Amino acid sequence: MAKINFDTSKRLDITCRRGDSFELELTLKDSSGIPINLGGTTLSTFEMVITSPLSGGSLVPSPGVLASTTGMEESTLAHIEIKVDVTDVGATTTADTTDAAYEAETAASGVVKFSMSKTDMKFLRTSHEPYEIAAHHVYDIKYINPNTTIDSEFEGKTILFGNFILKGDSSRTLR
């Protein structure tokens, strides 16, 4: 029997500490290793969501979209916003040095950053215990490609997923 797998996402488990600033920087490249132009006439967008995992093997989600990027359906349920910064801009050109349109000064970097402040990270938890040893969540990141449409919508593909483990922190900042 033949099989085809459309899931090209990669697993990356993230461990961080409650109350510490969070920044995840990714460089997206094509199959040739050339950075993807995330700028252009229509900027690429990204969605990231952190949720409580399904409870006890149940198919019913436990309460909890903990954080998400704005514009997602889940963002109305989240208490914390994940900020997204795409470094490529509208004037960014190809990063392919063999392309006639290549210009080093404006070449695409393919870099996207996801971040949450230390204050937001302090409140990212499922328990009311501020010093719990670790809280286990799950996350995924979706790349919305404005250059490809499927059934009149921009193509969306999950690129990363995994556990989002938040370790407890006993220090408190007064400011």
Image (cartoon, rainbow, N blue to C red):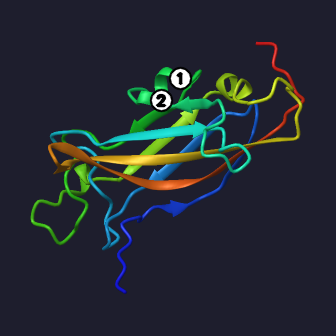
Q: Are marks 1 and 2 in contact (CB under 8 Å)?
A: yes
Looking at the rendered structure, the number of numbered marks drawn on it comes to 2
Near-viewer residue (158 or 14): 158
Q: Quadrant of residue 175?
A: top right
Look at the numbered disc 1 and give the secondary structure of its residue: loop
- The relative height of residue 33 versus residue 135 in the rendered view (above or below) is below
- The relative height of residue 88 versus residue 97 in the rendered view (above or below) is above
Residue 41 placement (x, y as % from top left): 15, 40
Return the mark for residue 74.
2
Q: Is residue 67 left or right of residue 93?
A: right
Q: Residue at x 18, y 41 (%)?
A: 91
Q: Is residue 144 left or right of residue 122?
A: left
Return the mark for residue 77.
1
Q: Quadrant of residue 94?
A: bottom left
- The relative height of residue 65 versus residue 119 in the rendered view (above or below) is below
Residue found farthest to the top: 175
Q: Amino acid at mark 2?
A: Glu
Q: Residue at x 41, y 64 (%)?
A: 7
Q: Is residue 100 left or right of residue 86?
A: left
Q: Residue at x 42, y 45 (%)?
A: 112
Residue 152 placement (x, y as % from top left): 14, 43
Residue found farthest to the left: 100
**Crowding near pointer 1: few (<14 within 10 Å), some, many (20+)?**
some
Q: Is residue 154 left or right of residue 12?
A: left
